[in-house]
Image: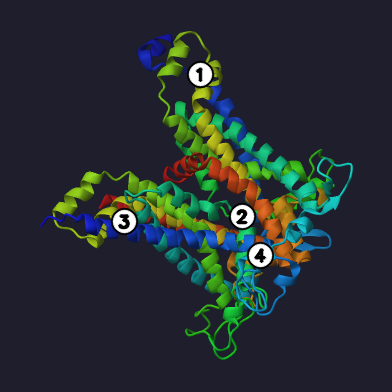
Amino acid sequence: MALKLARLGKQKKIPDSLPFWLLLPTVLILFIVQIYPTVYTAWLSLQERKPTGWIYVGTKNFERLFRSSLFNESVGHTIVFLVSFIALTMLLGFLTALLLNQKIRFVGFYLSLIFIPWVISTIISGQAFRLLVTPDYGVFAGILQDPALFPPNGISVLTDARPSPWFGSFPFPPSKGMILLVIASTWRSLPFTALLILASLQMIPTEIIESSRIDGANGWQIIRFILVPIILPTLVVTIFNLILTGMNGVAIIISLTGGGPGTSTQIISYLLYSLGWGQIQFSQAAALGLIIAVVNWILILATLRLTKVEEAR
Amino acid sequence: MKKNLSPFNKNIKHGLTHFSLALIGLFCILPIILIGIISLKSRMDIHRKPPVLFPCDTPTKSFDIRACRWSLEGYQLALGMRPDPDALLGFRLTGNIVRIYLFNTFLYATAASLLVVGLAGAAGYAFSRYRFRGHKVLLTAILAITGVPFLTNLVGLYQMGISIRKSALPIDDRVFLVLVYVGLFLPLSAWIAKGFFDAIPRDMEEAALIDGCSPFQSLILVVTPIAAPGMIAIFLLTFVNVWNEFMAGYLLVAKNEYKPVMFGLYDFMGQNTLNLQVVAAACIIIALPVILLFLLFRDRFFSAMVEGSIKG
């Protein structure tokens, strides 16, 4: 032992118990309030509430969920929401980051301005966008409800039903409430997205861009063939963050539309909330929670795999 | 082909950049400005049909800056301002928002952030400085936890909360909620802390060890002062996150006296569906502290957020 220590010499990795004690509280806390509740939810998804207590019912909750039309509809809403929210946020975020990466004055000022939405809580964000379109009293209600501008009856974002779907029962085109939800969610996620992309753009050495410009590449070609490939890992990480934000974004729906008009802004996480705390069907909510967790995992692993493939090329 | 932008073209390009950024900035700030305007209207102007943006119209003109009817009615109602001759400023704030909810949230956010800084700092240091068995597995596991949606865990946490309330455990909703917040924001913070420690050179600790410090002493006396800026960033990030969190507080707290501010605000919105100026004023009052905190410490926030996401 002494010999081994001596050989390690200057590196001196004395094995002591300090890291164990440093990590123990973190591991304990995560076990109690993260891992145990997940296991508890998983257990709950196989039970049913009876007057005598919880009873094991196997996969009945899952079967019931898959058969319900509300679940299928919510999956459609989730796809419409996630795709449009992520596409819009990434596009705007990338554009904002490119603009902020220019050598101009007042970048700090713009950065502060653009970052304000991040500090605003989801509940207040939802309320803010709701106040814009509240029937009769909202800021834009006068314009939107004008039959001359929007025939025949004007637009009422919070009450207009979803247009009849184009592809079978898939909820597309979305309701106006869903469009508002996408705009509000994009508004809140834009700062974070722009910051992450900006941080990775700033790490690119300027020589690369200069030399490609000398070689005759135009602005679009520089973006497409140089910037995007270099920052691809960051873009993937950002998308992965947005998937998590979008999948978990219940609070903003609660304060913006309450799932309405009708059920047109119910994405699966909102369905979980309304199953559990609206209809007091915790076993079904738990089953849905597990499904969402699994879908999250698949999406995360898929994005990670994708980055690996791109990096290997 | 070599492209050199003439000064004239460069000016156009800069102008366009500024214009686009101003437009995006406006999009980001507009909802907040509109809430601010609504909060300063009187009840009379809120319920106008068709609605007017500024309460500045007169019977003859559509906009007259001298005729603006700004009012603090919304703020007075949201704060529950009551005249009181004994109070320092001649009035008391009796509204639940200040008296209960803001106070609670300040308490929860401070407690949770301090705990997160302590725990994440310790964990981050251990991950950064030691290579032990299970190092990589544990680090990945902590990141993997964030892949489980919080709402999924809330189903279990809600049932746990019910059991705790029934049991004789000396844990009330407040302690439970703070623990949940710590667990929620700890994984990311531990990663951020590891990144910060990785950036600190080891020479000074090694010198301290050679001079006879124990590893624990060197952590407290040498490393902690250097790591302080990073730890402050983690504190601020967690503080704002807890301040703004809604779902956990909403679903895990039963008593009105224990409600955090976002839950209180949500109740308040339900009670004032027609008094939009009061709701708007409450939103401004509640958002202002964290907006100011962010504007004061902007770069600290950015360092923590970038560290947490790019490395993660």
The residue nearer to you, when weighing B87 against A134, is: B87
Return the mark for residue B222: 1
Frontmost of labels 1 and 2 is 2
> Are marks 1 and 2 in one subunit?
no
Pointer 1 local density, CA inside 10 Å: few below 14, some 14–19, many at least 20: some
Residue at (55% x, 71% y) in the render: A180
Residue picked out by circle 3: B14
Frontmost of labels 1 and 3 is 3
Which badge, 4 or 3, comes first in the chain's sequence? 3
Q: Please give left or right for residue A72 compared with residue B275 in the image.
A: left
Chain letter of disc 3 in the image:
B
Q: CA distance from mark 1 to mark 3?
A: 47 Å
What's under tag 4, amino acid-wise?
A: Ile
What's under tag 1, amino acid-wise?
A: Val
Q: CA distance from mark 3 to mark 2?
A: 33 Å
Q: Please give left or right for residue B7 compared with residue B121 in the image.
A: left
Pointer 2 local density, CA inside 10 Å: few below 14, some 14–19, many at least 20: many
Disc 2 is placed on an element classified as loop
What's under tag 2, amino acid-wise?
A: Ser
Q: CA distance from mark 1 to mark 4?
A: 52 Å
Residue picked out by circle 2: A121
Q: Please give left or right for residue B135 compared with residue A281 in the image.
A: left
